[in-house]
Image: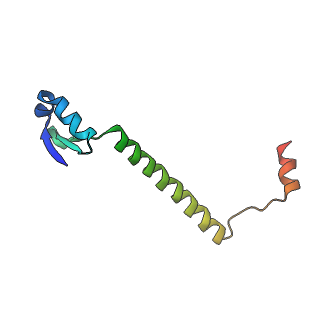
């Protein structure tokens, strides 16, 4: 990971984009600590996928806790079919 200034990115945008595409995250420092990170689309997609997976696992864990605490509703197949109508 490298850090650079916004001015340097403007002057050498292709260089920094190529670095990000090759797997090297680029931290761009900005005023008031409003920094940003340039990463490749592939790396972004992996991060987004990992976040969704973590959220899904949290839902599963909450559901598991509800089951363990008896906080569930049980329905027969006939009851479910009746609800469909």
Give how far across and how far down residue 70 sits, in percent: 69, 70
Quadrant hosting residue 7: top left
* Residue in the picture at 85% in, 56% down: 77
* Residue in the picture at 66% in, 67% down: 67
83 or 42: nearer the viewer: 42
Left or right of residue 35, residue 51 in this image: right
Residue at far front of view? 22
* Residue in the picture at 11% in, 33% down: 8
34 or 22: nearer the viewer: 22
Q: Which quadrant of the figure contains the C terminus?
A: top right
Give how far across and how far down residue 3 sits, in percent: 15, 45
Does 2 sit above or below residue 73? above
Give how far across and how far down residue 13 sits, in percent: 18, 30
* Residue in the picture at 83% in, 52% down: 80
Residue at far bottom of view? 68
Left or right of residue 52, residue 36 in this image: left
Does 25 sit above or below residue 61? above
Quadrant hosting residue 34: top left
Does 53 sit above or below residue 8? below
Left or right of residue 64, residue 80 in this image: right
Residue 37 showing in the rendered view: no
Quadrant hosting residue 69: bottom right
Residue 83 showing in the rendered view: yes
């Amino acid at each position: 990971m490298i850090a650079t200034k916004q001015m340097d990115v403007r002057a050498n945008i292709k260089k920094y984009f190529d670095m990000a595409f090759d797997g090297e995250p680029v931290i761009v420092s900005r005023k008031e600590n409003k920094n940003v990170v340039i990463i490749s689309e592939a790396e972004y997609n992996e991060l987004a996928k990992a976040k969704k997976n973590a959220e899904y696992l949290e839902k599963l864990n909450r559901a598991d806790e509800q089951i363990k605490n008896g906080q569930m509703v049980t329905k027969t197949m006939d009851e479910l079919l009746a609800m469909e109508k």
